[in-house]
Image: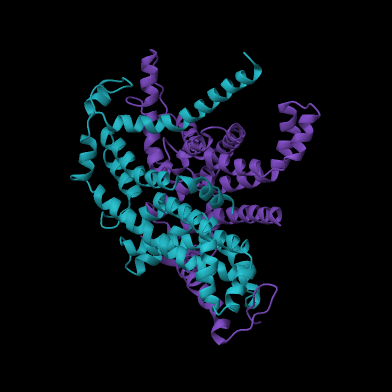
Chain colours: A purple, B cyan
Amino acid sequence: MTPSVVGRTLRGSGLDKALPYLMLGPALFLVLGVIVYPLIDGLRSSTGFFRFGRLVRDVGLDNYRQAFADPAFIGALLTTARFVFLAVTIETVLGLALALLVARERRFIRRIRATLILPMIVTPVVVGIVFRLIYASDVGLLASMAHAVGLDPPQILSSGTGAFLGLVFLDVWEWTPLLFLILLAGIQSMPVEPFEAARVDGAGAWRIFVDHTLPLLRPTILVAVTLRAIEALTTFDQVYVLTRGGPGTSTQLISIYGYQTFFQFQQVGYAAAMLFMVALVVLVAAGFSVGLMRRRAS
Amino acid sequence: MTKGRLSGIAWAVAALTAIAFAIIPLLWMILTSLKTNREITQDTSLIPESLTIGNYVSLFNGREFGAYLTNSIIVTSVSVAIALILGTQAAYVLARFRLRGGMHRYVGFSLLMVRLLPPIVIIIPIFLVAQQLGLLNTQLSLIVVYAAFNVTIVVWMMESFFREIPVDLEEAAMVDGDTRFTAFRRIVLPLAAPGLVATGIFAMITTYNEFLFALVLTSTPAAETMPVGAATLIGRINVDWGAMSAAGVVGALPIVIFSIFVQKHLVRGLTMGAVK
């Protein structure tokens, strides 16, 4: 088939026919070489048994079977699931509240919006540092505040539950702005007529929210939640700085466990197998949400 | 008091609470970085009595924060520039041409799927390949990897921008003697500039902030970026709170300054990066 402008045919010389491929080629070549080729290579290594980082023999699907018998893997999956569920739920509720709060144009509203998204711009590693400085039991912000009102400093990073909830709180602080941004865009693109009609009918703010805002916003919420959940599933940087997965395994998310399996325990094949299973889940979720976005767009 | 004014006050209180929630953690880090370690550990007061810049001086004297900063700026700007140049051309082709085998329909989507793969899954194979090629601990390896990841998002975002530009403009230019490529450069690209800016901002922020790839692929200040420098420093100095908080401030400062600089386009860039 001759390359042609969508919907219309364009006359062209030989160079014009080759042009689209010349323009597309470098980008595709880069992605295929740097991401896709190593991925295929990694998929091959997921069926191998490695010792000291060297392939010893091929073990077929044993690595995949091993994962389901590995309590640390199952534990990391459960911790990750709890983390994602809790953090994303809170972020969605708060993000929606924030979006509604600043949806209307007022004085300083642009400045306010720009300030509210600051946490998602700050480097994730630095966010980890910020929260170490808040949670530290001797010098942290919470300890200082407790001291100021005469209370004992809270022990957050030394207990399993405390560290887990501390991590959830960190994630809420950092990523509520993302949900806020997406939902704000959704609110701003909603039609005005149903809201005017409801107001004329004398409906209160809460009724309008439940009857009109929420149903109109549902597709946007669904997309935002899926996108955020996909990213939360592989949270790594903040945990690496804040707790390294501890105390015990209380904050050992799947990406931290995968990282340790590979770089500390040198179990190349097993780490690859484990993470490919996680990738499969993510891809299904991602395909679902992108499909949803496209349907909404067309 | 009227009902309108009451709700105005309630609104202001809610907005101020939200702003305080967003910035107090950051202010605390800045405040801690300006205290001496003696004051940090002995006084649990909220406001410091004397301010010092000693913590910052120590990052650049003796510790390698100057090198981290240079590495980060080089790696981020070069990889984003490559991605914008290659990705924009590719996106234009996908938006305007019918290609063999219906490629124009699925290439953009496939690239997005690659982008959404968990980084931890991809880093293991990339590490193995970089090791075989002897590219570990070089700026080059980070530039190439970041450029590849940024290309995926540039193509995905720019394709939708190009679709919004009417085809007639290019056709008119070509009737007037432009070739397809010069029409793209002279007519289409300037019209797509707002999209290019939004895409570039999004790519700059995510690339500067990236940690996992840099952690795995680099190991000395010859190539380590700011996030890696900050994270490895605090791994070594468990109780030097002053240096730790100064490292946090210096680590985030370049990207926060960049964001203030591009403030007008920031919200658009981030929103489109998230949903486009």
Position of residue B157 in the picture relative to residue A239 (left or right): right
Instruction: Report the residue that reaches farthest toward the left.
Output: B62
Task: Tell me the quarter of the picture where residue B99 sits.
Answer: bottom right
Position of residue A234 in the picture relative to residue B101 (left or right): left
Q: Position of residue B56 (x, y in %)?
A: 24, 39
* Observer able to see residue A243: no
Task: Tell me the quarter of the picture where residue A61 sits.
Answer: bottom right
Instruction: Report the residue that reaches farthest toward the front.
Output: B176
Q: Nearer the viewer, residue A283 or B141?
A: B141
Vertical arrangement, residue A126 with respect to residue B191, above or below: above
Task: Tell me the quarter of the picture where residue B39 sits.
Answer: top left
Q: Position of residue A56 (x, y in %)?
A: 41, 66
Position of residue A107 in the picture relative to residue A205 (left or right): left
Quadrant placement of the C terminus of chain B = bottom right
* Observer able to see residue B259: yes
Q: Nearer the viewer, residue B81 or B150?
A: B81
> Which residue is rendered at x = 60% and y = 60% of the image?
B160
Vertical arrangement, residue B201 with respect to residue A55, above or below: above
Quadrant placement of the N terminus of chain B = top right
Q: Which of B187 and A22 is in front in this view?
A: B187
> Which residue is rendered at x = 18% and y = 45% of the image?
B62
> Which residue is rendered at x = 71% and y = 37% of the image?
A214
Q: Position of residue B121 (x, y in %)?
A: 49, 57
